[in-house]
Each structure stands twice: as C-alpha cells, then as structure tokens.
Image: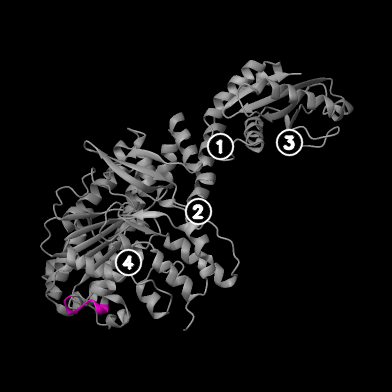
Amino acid sequence: MRWKPLPVGVDDFEKLIHEQYFYIDKTLLIKDLLDMKGEVNLFTRPHRFGKTLNMSMLRYFFEKSSRDTAALFQGLKIMEAGEHYLSHMGKYPVISLSLKSMKQPTYQLSFEMMKKTVSEEFLRHWPVVEHSRKLTEAQRERFLRLRDLGGIAADYADALKFLSECLHICCEEKAVILIDEYDALLANSYFCGFYDETISFIRSLFESALKTNEHLAFAVVTGCLRISKESIFTGLNNLKMNSITTELYSEHFGFTQSEVDQILSFYSLEKQRDLLRQWYDGYQFGFTEVYNPWSVINYIELCTQNEKALPRPYWSNTSSNSIVRSLVERADLSVKQEIESLIAGKTITKPIHEDITYEDIYSTQDNLWNFLFFTGYLKKIREMQEGETIYMEMAIPNREVLYIYKTTVLRWFEEQTEKKELSPLYESILNGDTEKMARILSENLMETISFYDYQENYYHGFLAGMLKNIGNYIVLSNRESGTGRPDILLKYPSVRGKAVILELKVSGTYQGLEEKCDEALRQIEERNYAAELNAEGYQDILKYGVAFYRKECMVKRG
C-alpha cells in the first residue's frame, strides 16, 4: 500500500485528490443533499471541522466544466450510490464564494475585499458567458463592470443573483450557490464597530440570491453559528437548518471512530488510539460522536515522524475567541465558579437556543454557554425539555479543549484581575492591617478559577500575581534566605524602607486557618527567614503568616 501525505491545511478537493493526499471519504454528503432536496441548506459546525473541504468537494462534483472532474471521484463512495446521483455530476453552473477574506478592520476595506471576491467569481465564469453570447448588451456590460471591479454599490447588493441569472441563461441550467463562512464577517464587523452597515449589505446579497430566486437550483451555506434574528434569512421558507444538534448529516463533518481507526491502520499507528480519543474525541453531532479532524491529522502526521510523539493542542477556535472573551470579561462570580467546575471535570446544565443574535449578545449570561457550545468549547452530554425551553447538560469535550480553558480562558480572567485597583491591598500589607489583607485576598480569590485543586502553588501564583505591581517594591519568590526559602519577599530598594516576609500555608478545613497561620509564623522564625534582610540593613521587617482554605484567606502578623 503506497504511503500518502496527510492533508494538513489542504482544503481544495482537486489538489487533495491529484496530489494523492490521504482522504477520509465524505462524498456521501452529496447523496444526502440530493435525497433531502433542500433548496437552501445551512450547515453550522465549529472551526476546522472540514466545512471548507466539503464545500470544495461539492463544487467539483456539481460544476459543469470542460475538464473531466469525474476522475476526481473515482473509487469514492458516491460513485457506488447509483445513476440517479451521478446524473447530477457536472450538471450545474456553480457559484462558490467564501466570506473569509472580508474580515477586515474597517467597513470600507471589508467592502473592497468583497468586491474583489465577487470579481474573481465573475472572472472565473467569464469564458462561459463569452462563449455562449446569450446575454443582452446591458447584461453583458454589467457583468464586465462586476468582473473588472467597476460596479457601484447597487451592482453588488444583488451580485450573486445576477450571476446566477447570467449562468442560467448561458448554461440553460439553474445555478448552485455555495457560500462558505458566512458568519465570520458578521462577528468581525460587530467587534470592529461597523455591524449595521455589514448586516444591511449581507441581507441584500443573501435575500436576492437565496429567496425566490428563479435561477437557483439549490444552495449550501456554512458557518460556525446560526445568525437568523438579524434577518439575514428573513422569510427564507426554503431554509433547512443543520446544526451540531441535528441528526441529519452528523457524520459528514469531523471524523467518526471508524474513520480514525482507518487512518491509524493506514499509518500503522494503532497504539495511539487511546491517546487520540482522550485528546481529540468527544464532540457530539446529533447522535454521532466525532473527533476534531484538524487535530487528528496534525497529530498523526507528527507520529509518522516520531511514533512516540506526545499529543499537543492544535485547535484554537480563533473565529470565536473575540466573542467568548467579551462574554468572559462580563462574567459574574457564578459563571466563574461554573467554569471552574467544568475544568474539574463536572457538567453544567443550561438553556440552549440556536438563534444567536449579536445585538442581544450581552442581554443574558446564557449567551456565553450558547457560544461555547456551538463553537466547540463544550459538548452535549444529554438534553431535556421543560415547557418550551430546551436544556443541555454539557462538559468539556477532551483534553485539548481543557488545555484551552486552562490557558486562554483563564488568562482572560487573570487579565481582568490585573486591571483592578489594588492599592488598598498594598496599603494594608505595608501598614500591618491583617483583617483588611485577608478580606481583599478572599474577595479576589472568589473571582479566580483554580484547576490545581487548591494546592499551595496555586495560592503562591495568585498572591505573587497580585503583588507584582506594588509600587517601587521588589517582589522575590522562593529566594534563598536563612536556612530555607520564604514564599514571597517584598523589599523597598533602600534599606531605610520596609521589607515584608509572607509565608503561605494551605488548610484542609476552614476551622484550621488560624492554626496554619501560626505554623507559617513559626516557620519564619525557626528558619530565620529575616537573616538576609537583617544582613542587608533592613530594620523595619513585617512578617505574615497567610493561610488559605479554598477561596477563604486568613492573615496573622508575627
């Protein structure tokens, strides 16, 4: 059996087949689309779950071309599906558009990139139009304006419908329209501040192309989220919605267990099966459990070079990071506690609704859980219905996503803490106010997330982080002094100023906090932690025993 390269980053179906990359056969998506007869089919899946490659595969199958694209599908499952399905191969003019390039910092730049994208698609179809000579002079002139970036705004508002009309006339067959990453532009424009202009334009573009368009055979649209309340799809009675909660098409995006086994067998890497499952499995689409395909092929490629390679995180859902971050920054204490619970391996149950609206994004904290669920940060355990509301029990899918929580999401929380005014804490430390110190530290602990199971290193990192901006003071952690290492030392640059010794302990009970504070103070004396400070010339030395129990803190001064 001939060795094949893995298609890391390859999302063009023709290139993948011609250059003989390893391919997990998803061509029965074509059969299901034809069977279901949806006129406008919207697929929402997390980032990097094979949407763009599938769209490319659809284009090569359905598009009428002078090239023999049938050769691309030889040996694939769709070729065994029957003549009814193969009769659609190479039958239609296909309009293929990705909105990915339109994610720009300003509306003007975004609109210019849209014009270029549309222009490239008109240019791609120009040979067909020129050869047929069936367009009127006015149609031909407008076609050339759009091809050559000369159109006015009104030309672009219904450009896709116009292109489908031209192709219908020239090819005598209705057009297939493929739109990839339709919601990426909306999220970007929302956070860049030109959402209203974008939504108005996209609504015109989509409605004209997808609603009562007599030149449309059918359309497929993909994205991460369903954005419907902004009226992008207003009145589209022909829209068939297929999300991660839908049973139909569930096996066509992501890898199933049997498909992962197929890859492992091909590369003789069956020993990595359990690691792959722990790190990259766990997503639930409909009733089908799937792996993250991007991470699987990246890890297997690494293993082909080193069979003992350790798994690592490859997936970063950058397409939704700005959304999730903005919601995290507004999260209250209960949300932070729930995220801590998720990191600890527990589940949460929340109401889930599929109609995401950016305009109401901050109206309820439940929107955070919706975004986390639909963009791949959470997986379904089970769902239930109470009245009209659907509730979803959810958990973190796998170790790869757990890593993202432990790094990216926790860093956002930490950055919020860093913006706080901490001068009252600093004053209490330098003035010997232990009650105020304990209260402020406890309040801030409540807003942090622990995944260290409340070990001493968690509290050490927490306190060191709180103290890193304490004016002109030098902060030293676990430095050699006397006969041991104090946890944290604070020193004023001049020995005429103050020095502070902080020794930390963790208690197993709330009642044991005071005893642990006393133990910390005894350790400071017994190990002579002040020795080096005395030798340097410091006279004013404050000594604190600091004890923690979960999110509670007690401080005593020696």
Q: Earlier in the sequence, mark 1 or mark 2?
A: 2
Q: CA distance from mark 3 to mark 1?
A: 20 Å
- Quick one: SS at disc 4? helix
User: At x 47% / y 83%, what residue is drawn?
Assistant: 2
Type of amino acid at the residue the image marks with label 2: Glu
Write down the quadrant of residue 176 in the picture.
bottom left
- Quick one: SS at disc 2? helix
Q: Earlier in the sequence, mark 4 or mark 1?
A: 4
Q: Earlier in the sequence, mark 3 or mark 1?
A: 1
Which residue matches tag 2? 400
Q: Which mark is residue 515?
A: none
Q: Earlier in the sequence, mark 4 or mark 3?
A: 4
The correct choice, above or below, for 544 with respect to 138 in the image is above
Q: Earlier in the sequence, mark 2 or mark 3?
A: 2
Q: Earlier in the sequence, mark 2 or mark 4?
A: 4
Quadrant of the rendering where the C terminus is positioned = top right
Q: CA distance from mark 4 to mark 3?
A: 53 Å
- Quick one: SS at disc 1? loop
Is 432 included in the stretch rendered in magenta?
no
The correct choice, above or below, for 158 with respect to 496 in the image is below
**Of 307 and 67, which appears nearest the observer?**
307
Provide residue 5's location: percent of width, then percent of height: 48, 75
Which residue matches tag 3? 477
Magenta stretch, residue numbers: 79-84
Q: Which mark is residue 54?
A: 4
What is the crowding at mark 4: few (fewer than 14 residues within 10 Å), some, or many (at least 20)? many
Which residue matches tag 1? 450
**Of 426 and 242, which appears nearest the observer?**
242
Q: CA distance from mark 2 to mark 4?
A: 24 Å
**Of 118 and 284, which appears nearest the observer?**
284
What is the crowding at mark 3: few (fewer than 14 residues within 10 Å), some, or many (at least 20)? some
Provide residue 367's location: percent of width, then percent of height: 34, 38
